[in-house]
Amino acid sequence: MNRRTALAALHFGALFFGLTGVFGKLAASASPAVIVFGRAAFAVLALALFASLTGPGWQRLSGQDTRRLLFGGMLLAGHWVSFFIAVKVGGVAIATLGFASFPAFTVILEGLLFRERIRRNEGVLVLLVSIGLILVTPSFDLASQATGGLLWALLSGLLFSLLSLTNRAGSGRLPAVQAALWQNLVVGVCLLPFAGPGLSQVAGLDWLWIALLGVFCTGIAHSLFVASLAVIKARTAAVVFAMEPVYGIAVAWAIFAETPTLRMLLGGALIIFAIVLSSRMSAEQPTRPKVPAQAP
């Protein structure tokens, strides 16, 4: 894979991650629990196929690895369920931009959990995300669907932040695809009791959207990201993946006529700028993992 091919792979990966909310909304008859269970199941198949083709040289799991993967899988399950609830309640744009607040949560949690001093530019990041979220929120009425969807999306971002920090603590020992596969297995096991009773009620077309969600938006997207890192610097890759909300909102605009207001566009621009800023800051610190936790 040369640099041009790697860049193309990154953009396709960002596009697939951005389509997560779109496929979740298209699966109209499926509950968030069913969507997440199906996504995890199809993702396991796609990741296993990728691993068999590339031969990543998996590591034997230690007791600490197992505990971390179990905890990470439970966080991933909560992150995905809350994200798809946000999509169902508030729409794709609100859910995507609310989730995109996770860099601010990461800065705050790193300061609390790892006792790392918050630098001035990280404080600016938190401020930008906060202003962006205020602009994205149509109203502050807790009874409104948009506000409810944003709150679920913020919970999704918080859980994703915790997942990223969990993966950070165990980074470097396990191949990224191996960790992703095991965490998706945990997600499937966690959601089976909740999703099982509703599986037979899901329409056939909705299973297609869920399969595309698991294969393309999880397995292939994650695999493209991992493969491209052999050629592309982590900083460049992270900035390209900042396009994820743009792709998601643009496709939702075209398919569902979710036309963003000028205020939402301004708020989204601030949040996306904060993502780019966060990506550049993370890339400057070599001790942090190159491969992030799985995106929404």
Image (cartoon, rainbow, N blue to C red):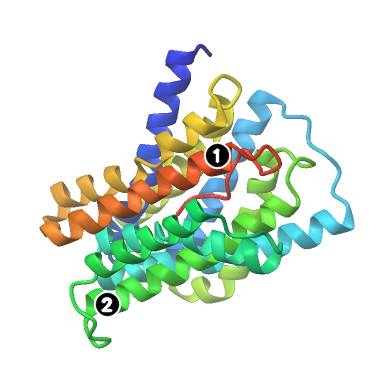
Tag on residue 18?
Answer: none
Label 2 SS: helix
Image position of 153 (left or right of 193): left
Residue at the spot of label 1: 46
Return the x and y of residue 80 as percentages of the image width and height.
48, 63
Image position of 91 (left or right of 220): left
Residue placed most toward the observer, 103 or 34: 103
Question: Is residue 43 placed above or below 84 in the rendered structure?
Answer: above
Label 1 SS: helix
Q: Is residue 143 visible?
A: yes
Please give the name of the residue rendered at 44% of the width and 16% of the height, measured from the top-left corner: 5
Return the x and y of residue 94 as percentages of the image width and height.
27, 64
Return the x and y of residue 81 as percentages of the image width and height.
46, 68
How crowded pointer 1 is (Cα within 10 Å; few <14, some 14-19, many 20+) is rated as many
Q: Disc 1 vs disc 2: which is toward the camera?
A: 2
Please give the name of the residue rendered at 51% of the width and 67% of the height, measured from the top-left corner: 158
Please give the name of the residue rendered at 66% of the width and 24% of the height, measured from the top-left corner: 54
Q: Is residue 201 visible?
A: no
Image position of 90 (left or right of 218): left
Return the x and y of residue 97 as percentages of the image width and height.
32, 58
Query: To which quarter of the image does residue 88 belong?
Result: bottom left
Please give the name of the residue rendered at 43% of the width and 73% of the height, measured from the top-left corner: 198
Residue placed most toward the observer, 102 or 258: 102
Image position of 154 (left or right of 290): left
Residue at the spot of label 2: 147
Q: Residue furthest top?
A: 2
Pick whichever of labels 1 and 2 is earlier in the sequence. 1
* Number of marks in picture: 2
